[in-house]
Image (cartoon, grey):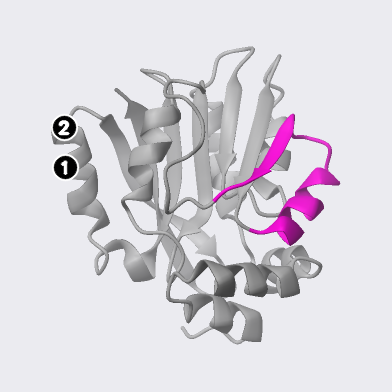
């Protein structure tokens, strides 16, 4: 099914240009949640948060990579994980402003996930990334950085849009990461993404090695 929302069409037409991505989400930040949750039935943040919550212990420090308006962080706080602390990264200053209003993040920073992250290895007890691995945004190579900043044994939960899973070689990239000892692939399953738009994703449950 082709998207009807003009901003979603614009999102899927992106070619990875950071300036254009920032411009899109600057324009979209104010209406993003109404458009995606109410208009499209965006359920991926809740599914990813649930999958991550099942793998976390108490006092966990989590990185929400590509946090957008904070939907995943907000969903995580509903799972009553004692001592949970969440940091968020996003390319868009406008989206980060929306996320800050939720008051669920310890720290929010601007970052380009196509480049090395300015943080040490083994920093987080869990990493989650939702809505990032999709058309014209971030390719599978970004998963290497997510695994790098996760502590050994930490869960890394990512969604990959159905439109890019095969064409962009995600399955092969994950196999290569596993072969190099960077992650252990615990589960890859089909999950709803935009229910009203009819889109699905691969929900990938990884473990940093």
Please give the name of the residue rendered at 71% of the width and 15% of the height, measured from the top-left corner.
Answer: 83
Q: What's the magenta region? A: 92-111
Residue 185: image tag = none
User: Which quarter of the rendering shows the C terminus?
Assistant: top left
**Which residue position holds label 2?**
180
Seen in the picture, residue 167 relative to 87 is either above or below; the reply is below
Q: Nearer the viewer, residue 8 or 79?
A: 8
User: Is-magenta flag for residue 68?
Assistant: no
Please give the name of the residue rendered at 60% of the width and 18% of the height, measured from the top-left corner.
Answer: 60
Instruction: Give the x, y percent position of residue 151.
Output: 42, 19
Q: Is residue 139 left or right of residue 70?
A: left
Please give the name of the residue rendered at 22% of the width and 60% of the height, measured from the top-left corner.
Answer: 169
Residue 176: image tag = 1
Seen in the picture, residue 164 relative to 53 is either above or below; the reply is below
For the view shown, which residue lies furthest in the left direction? 179
Seen in the picture, residue 59 relative to 139 is either above or below; the reply is above
- In contact (CB < 8 Å): disc 2 and disc 1: yes
């Amino acid at each position: 099914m082709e998207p009807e929302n003009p901003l979603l069409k614009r999102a899927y037409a992106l070619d990875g240009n950071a300036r254009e991505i920032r411009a899109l989400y600057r324009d979209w930040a104010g209406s993003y949640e109404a458009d995606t949750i109410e208009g499209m039935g965006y359920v991926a943040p809740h599914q990813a948060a649930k999958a991550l919550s099942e793998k976390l212990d108490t006092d966990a420090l989590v990185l929400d990579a590509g946090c957008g308006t904070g939907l995943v962080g907000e969903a995580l706080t509903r799972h009553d994980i004692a001592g949970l602390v969440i940091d968020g990264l996003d390319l868009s200053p406008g989206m980060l402003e929306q996320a800050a209003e939720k008051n669920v993040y310890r720290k929010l920073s601007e970052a380009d996930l196509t480049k090395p992250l300015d943080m040490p290895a083994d920093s987080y007890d869990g990493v989650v990334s939702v809505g990032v691995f999709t058309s014209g945004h971030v390719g599978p190579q970004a998963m290497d950085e997510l695994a790098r900043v996760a502590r050994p044994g930490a869960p890394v939960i990512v969604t990959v849009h159905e439109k890019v899973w095969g064409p962009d070689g995600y399955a092969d990239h994950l196999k290569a990461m596993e072969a190099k000892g960077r992650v252990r692939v615990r589960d890859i399953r089909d999950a709803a993404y935009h229910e009203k738009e009819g889109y699905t994703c691969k929900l990938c449950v990884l473990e940093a090695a």
